[in-house]
Structures are given as C-alpha cells and as structure tokens.
Image (tube, helix red, strand yellow):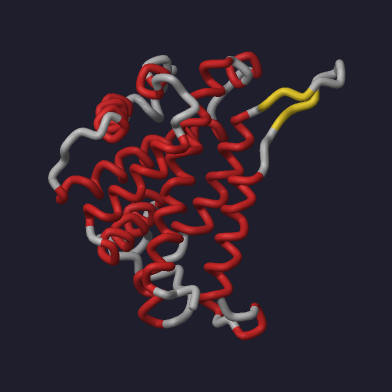
Amino acid sequence: MQSEGNMSNLQQTIYETKAFHEKCLELSHGVLKRNGEWMNFWPTHFIFAFIAFNNVYNINWQESIRRGRVCKKAFPCTSNNPTESDKMNALIDFCCTVLGNNSAYNYYKSRLCASLSFIENPVAEIHNVYIDSRTRNNYPEFVKVLNKVYYDAILIDDIKPEYMKKLVLFVYKVRCNTFHGSKAIDQLVDESQQQRFRIYTAIVLSLNELFFHTVNEMGAFN
C-alpha cells in the first residue's frame, strides 16, 4: 500500500473507511451500571457498525472507480434522488459485477456465518422479533432469506444479489426503528434483543467485508 501522503483521494477514502470498519470489529460496547459493573450493550455496537456501513454505501463506487475520485452522485437507479435502499443495492451490485454473483455471495455468506457462529440458532432468535409498522412488510421475507443463507440452501446465481439486498433492507428498517421508534430500556437490555442486534450487526459488517474484499481484488489499494 502506498503511504498516506501519496494516496489518491479515492484510495484515501477507502483506507479511512476500512480503518473505521476495523474499529467496529475490534471494539466492544457496554454500559456502566451504578454498581460499577459493565454490561455488554449490542444496540450501540449495531449503531456504530451501521455508521461504518453508511460510510461505504453512500459512495457510488462504480462511478468512483471509473473516474478515479470519490463520487457520491449518479447512482444507478430510476430517480434523481436515490433512496438509502438504492444506494445499498448499488453497493451490492458493484461487488457482484466485479466478483460475479456466485463469488460475491459465497464470500458474504462465509463472513456472515462466521460472525453468527456464536449463536446456537440465529434463525430461531429472529422469530422473537417484535414487528412494528416499519418492519412488518419485510419481516417474513427476511426470515425466509436468512434461513436459506445460513443453512446453505442451493440458490441460482441470479437471485443471490437479491438475497443480500433483502437482508440488509430489513436491517435498515431496524436501524430506523432504533433511532426513531419507541424502545424502552428494558427492551434494549433484554437478552434476546441483544442477540438480535448481534445478528443485525453481523449482516452489515459482512457487507463491508465483501466491499473491501472486492476493491482489494481490483487492486484499488495498490
């Protein structure tokens, strides 16, 4: 890798987003009780992870690579004002275009399953989700997709990018609910809720891992 002083604007951005991502993998998050004891608190880890993911998907990487500089416009979608979902989809499409649907999906699945190995049955944990107006429409498909991804169902290549998109779309809805919904503190510290936040965190950080693998394969760090 070049020294930071010799990096292009694009390389520097990749370097900085990767450094933030690595902090997400390195750091644990907790809350300090009045009795002086620390307790793991996955909701803040999830928010920190989503900030790292936001740093990645808010850049149009296909256009940035083509121009050789950071581009946050011209996302490939039907609207002049792309939604957050459009931007996340563009990130996944970029990785799949570079690596191929099968290779991108397999890499993502390997990172996700490795991150979920600490939970005995992640799919069963997801069945305990409290469904509200933000998540209701996407929840059934999320459960079906997570089940197929985690238990290694045979999928045709064409739908593999769509499965990654469906997972992250639901997690984005959870992110919105965490920021804007009404969550009582006893809900956030509930053990089942903590486990679900670990699952959501793994889903977004595994997409970051896929992105950094993709640009590494392209030689964008060189």
Residue 220 image-quadrant placement? bottom left
Query: In this rendering, would 183 be left or right of 97?
Result: right
Q: Is residue 137 visible?
A: no
- Viewer-proximal residue, 78 or 116? 116
The residue at the point 33 percent across, 59 percent down is: 90
x and y percent of residue 73 in the render?
A: 41, 69
- Viewer-proximal residue, 36 or 70? 36
Is residue 28 positioned above or below 20 on the image?
above
The residue at the point 24 percent across, 46 percent down is: 162
- Viewer-proximal residue, 12 or 139? 12
x and y percent of residue 207 in the render?
A: 41, 49
x and y percent of residue 141 in the render?
A: 26, 30
The residue at the point 37 percent across, 60 percent down is: 81
Query: In this rendering, would 192 be left or right of 77?
Result: right
Residue 75 image-quadrant placement? bottom left
Is residue 62 positioned above or below 149 on the image?
below
Is residue 74 positioned above or below 96 on the image?
below
